[in-house]
Amino acid sequence: MNTKTESNITSMSFEEALAQLENIVDRLERGDTLLEESIRIYERGEALKKHCEKLLQKAESKVEKIQLNSNGLPEGLTPINES
């Protein structure tokens, strides 16, 4: 994958990347593309998948849960991956 394509992907939102990834999966499942084209779009799909995973991990790290005190009132925030 070339640098221009990679920078194009890294500038996409999660929704844009996911839509393109779904389109690639549909095309590959149909099986109506030539071998070279299939390889090219498969590689792009891999890059899109990695980008989506990265964005999801970033979002998960921002999600927080509210800690309540003994009276049931909000006391603070804790990252969701901590108990």
Image: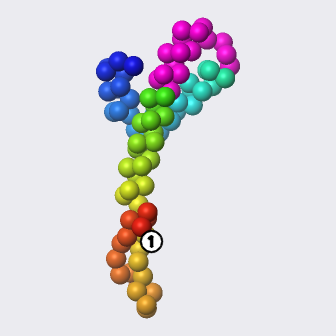
Q: Which residue is at 44% across, 29% downward?
A: 47
Examine the rendered structure and indicate whether residue 5 appears above or below residue 53: above
Question: Dot 1, crowdedness within 10 Å: few (<14), some or many (≥20)?
Answer: few
Q: What's the magenta region?
A: 30-45
Q: Please say whether residue 40 is one of the residues in the magenta stretch.
A: yes
Query: In the orientation shown, which residue stands out farthest toward the right?
Result: 30
- Name the residue tied to disc 1: 83
Examine the rendered structure and indicate whether residue 31 appears above or below residue 16: above
Residue 67 lies, in percent from the top left, at: 41, 77
Magenta residues: mostly which secondary structure? helix
Q: Which residue is at 60% across, 27% downward?
A: 25
Q: Is residue 79 left or right of residue 43?
A: left
Residue 17 lies, in percent from the top left, at: 46, 33
Q: Which residue is at 37% across, 58% downward?
A: 62
Residue 10 lies, in percent from the top left, at: 35, 33
Q: Please say whether residue 27 is one of the residues in the magenta stretch.
A: no
Q: Amino acid at mark 1?
A: Ser
Q: Which residue is at 47% across, 23% downward?
A: 44
Examine the rendered structure and indicate whether residue 68 appears above or below residue 21: below
Snapshot quadrant of residue 79: bottom left
The quarter of the image holding the C terminus is bottom left
Q: Is residue 57 left or right of residue 27?
A: left
Snapshot quadrant of residue 11: top left
